[in-house]
Image (spheres, coloured by chain):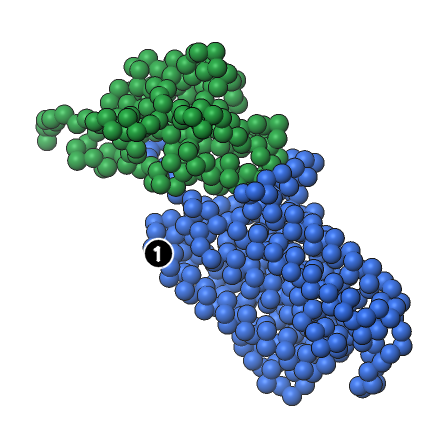
Chain colours: A blue, B green
Amino acid sequence: MGDWEWPLILFTVLGQIAIGIILMLWWLARNRNLNIQLFKRGVHVSGGLLLIALLASLFHLGHPEAAYRALAHLGSSWLSREILFFLLTFLAWIYLFRLSRQQTSSHTLGSGASIITTAETAAGGQPTSNLSLGLGITSLLGLLGIASSAMIYVLPRVPAWNNGGPVLFFLLTTGLLGALCTLVLGGNLLQTAQKKLLLQVSLGCTIFSLILSVIYGSMLSASMEGAASLNYHLSSPLFWVRALVSWLAPLLLLVIILKSPDLGKKNLILTVTLLVGLGEILGRALFYLSATGIQITALF
Amino acid sequence: MSKQLGFLHNSEKCVGCRGCEIACKNEYQIEATPQWRKVFQLHEDDFSLPTRMFFSMACNHCAHPECLRVCPVKAYTKREDGIVIHDPNRCIGCRLCTMACPYDRPQINPAKKKVEKCNLCYQRIDQGEKPACVTACIPGALELVEINDSLDQKTGILKTLPGLPSPKITSPSIRFIGPKQGKQIRRD
């Protein structure tokens, strides 16, 4: 069985939240109605999370000072590719940060009491296409980084990982926490339709994650090592806490929020986000803890 | 790659003395924790009659080494003679190779925070000598051989033993002569 890999848990979960936020901003920007304050807030928070994630990843290494060498084997090592894509994502984020720092004009959308400056006028009158392109490129690079992260674990030695599971689970975390964190960051800056869309994405990801976990679990029993991973999950109290806080409670709360006329109170959305965040951290910890590799079973 | 060097282990001759383990540690002054070579005892239940048999295993210098594939810093190289060499100067201690190897042979040295493994005494081989473990094996259970079809076609040569991972994963360059079980008479 594996260990508590805190640096990797933080790197993967925080990195996925950061890229999830950018992805959601890109999605919202497609109709040219992304609120510039939300854009700024999202870019700043995702950048902070990305930076913490990258720094956390260094603590996994025996020699962090030589981490730059990890780019040396792009030909076959997914770890090299992961580092490359995350660095490129960070470079693309710097471009977004520059856009967010530029002054905005007073173009407004007069909905409600607050003045909402749209992304159309972001970056000192630059066209929306720049902003949308920046968000799109950052999202794409980030998603490639997340897929590469997941592919690191697709090892023939570890049957529980040697399938599409890690890629799907990592992408689902990105979508789920990206949508929920954007909802928290957006607050009143989001239009009702946007709120509804993000809530629907969150609910969809939760349902898909639950179904996928059941299918994935049933497939694990095919091999002795996979069955050991499954048993570890089912016998660990962490798994049941994870099931409660990142599947059952969010399913219930998200349906309640979606059914309420004003799409729920801010505190309720924050509660769901915190529960899911805790659940995803526990889930990632279990991912590493339950890893059972094919090994020599002779006596020592 | 012109050839593939590897080990031939004869479980019938091995007495489990662990002389090979100690010779390896002595040759490279390896610290206590990483064990480049290790002697294992086969499960008695894996055979039709109760038996006490051993095998000795270090890095298998696989034909398709997973350690080499996953390493992000190119610390692993495969020589023309098939030996897989790990360069500790390039290693950054990411431990991915230790997760990928089904034989658990690349191991982290906690003091150096880097991975280490058997390099098949390539410097001795280059000088026409045998590896330290092979030289130290008193019963002659461990041999350095060239892994090829003619070896595999010999009677009694096995690609794996009970309790070992499938050789399909990495095509390890080790062959075995399995234990022979004689007639046993037991008093109840």
Instruction: Kindly identify which residue carries mark 1.
Output: A221
Q: Is residue B90 above or below residue B125?
A: below
| Depth check, front residue: B103 or B122 | B122
Q: Kindly give the residue lying farthest to the front in the view shown.
A: B2
Residue drawn at x 33%, y 23% as measured from the top left: B8
In the rendered structure, which amino acid carries the disc numbered 1?
Ser
Q: In this orientation, does residue A266 appear? A: yes
Question: Relative to A15, is A47 on the left or the right?
Answer: right
The kind of secondary structure element at disc 1 is loop
| Label 1 Cα neighbours within 10 Å, binned few <14 / some 14-19 / many ≥20 | some
Q: Is residue A131 left or right of residue A279?
A: right
Q: Give the x, y percent position of residue A52.
A: 71, 52
Specify the subunit that label 1 lies on. A
**Residue sitting at 26 percent across and 19 percent down?**
B13
Query: How many marks are shown on the rendered structure?
Result: 1
The answer to whether B101 is drawn above or below residue B150 in the figure is: below
Position of A249 relative to A101 (above/below): below
Q: Quadrant of residue A92?
A: bottom right
Q: Position of residue A120 (x, y in %)?
A: 80, 74
The location of residue A48, given as percent across then percent down, is: 74, 56
Q: Quadrant of residue A36?
A: bottom right
